[in-house]
Image (spheres, rainbow, N blue to C red):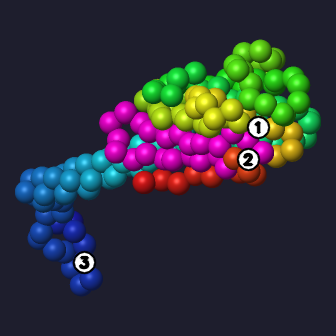
């Protein structure tokens, strides 16, 4: 019995060697590297977009929660951003009393919850008009559904995307839009 080098094909043996040449392996390796590089940068962009949306949604949720609590518990709630310039925190206060005037400061009530932005996110331009026509960095939600109207922006470091969040004075409605 003789052994032949090659592979068995229909009708006999083929004299060709099986396998890949070095050039074929290098071409496939380079193509796979390019595809993985494109996928990596696309994934990073998608991840950053999700982080931006997450920060915006967290602030909207915090504001809407305070608005709902105010109506449900028949008391005034305050969301204090601390600074109108730029901040990474917010505090929700339950402010006792009626809703006939503006509250001088949110800290006169009971602290309900806090919010801290993830790294890289920040709130800027918090500006809310109170009933006495002053502008503050806190928004008041009143038991009858009204609020101190105004707006703020949520942004991330290293990104040009900014989300604008608005609180309607008459209805207390919280809305958001991205740019």
The quarter holding residue 159 reads: top left
Distance CA(mark 3)–CA(mark 1): 82 Å
**Decide: marks 1, 2 in contact (CB < 8 A)?**
yes
Range covered by the magenta-colored residues: 146-168
Residue at far top of view: 108
Q: Is residue 65 visible?
A: no
**Quarter of the N terminus within the rendering:** bottom left
Q: Residue at x 69, y 19 (%)?
A: 105
The quarter holding residue 135 reads: top right
* Residue marked by disc 2: 172
Secondary structure beneath dot 2 equals loop
Q: Residue at x 25, y 72 (%)?
A: 8
* Residue marked by disc 3: 9
* Residue marked by disc 1: 141
Of labels 3 and 1, the one closer to you: 1
x then y, percent, for residue 17 = 13, 63
Distance CA(mark 1)–CA(mark 2): 7 Å
Secondary structure beneath dot 1 equals strand
Q: Residue at x 81, y 38 (%)?
A: 142
Magenta highlight on residue 172: no
Q: Is residue 64 above or below residue 117?
A: below
**Decide: marks 3, 1 in contact (CB < 8 A)?**
no
x then y, percent, for residue 104 = 70, 20
Q: Is residue 162 left or right of residue 29?
A: right
Q: Residue at x 86, y 39 (%)?
A: 143
Comparing 17 with 61, the one in front is 61
């Amino acid at each position: 019995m003789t052994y032949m080098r090659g592979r068995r094909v229909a009708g006999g043996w083929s004299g060709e060697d099986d396998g890949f040449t070095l050039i074929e392996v290098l071409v496939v390796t380079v193509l796979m590297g390019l595809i993985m590089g494109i996928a990596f940068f696309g994934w990073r962009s998608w991840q950053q977009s999700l982080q931006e949306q997450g920060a915006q949604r967290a602030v909207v949720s915090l504001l809407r929660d305070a608005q709902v609590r105010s109506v449900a518990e028949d008391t005034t709630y305050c969301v204090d951003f601390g600074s109108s310039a730029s901040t990474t925190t917010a505090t929700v206060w339950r402010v006792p009393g009626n809703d006939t005037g503006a509250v001088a400061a949110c800290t006169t009530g009971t602290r309900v919850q806090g919010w801290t932005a993830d790294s890289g996110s920040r709130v800027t331009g918090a500006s809310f008009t109170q009933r006495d026509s002053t502008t503050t960095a806190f928004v008041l939600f009143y038991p009858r559904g009204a609020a101190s109207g105004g707006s703020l922006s949520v942004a991330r470091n290293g990104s040009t995307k900014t989300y604008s969040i608005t609180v309607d004075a008459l209805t207390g409605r919280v809305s958001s839009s991205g740019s």
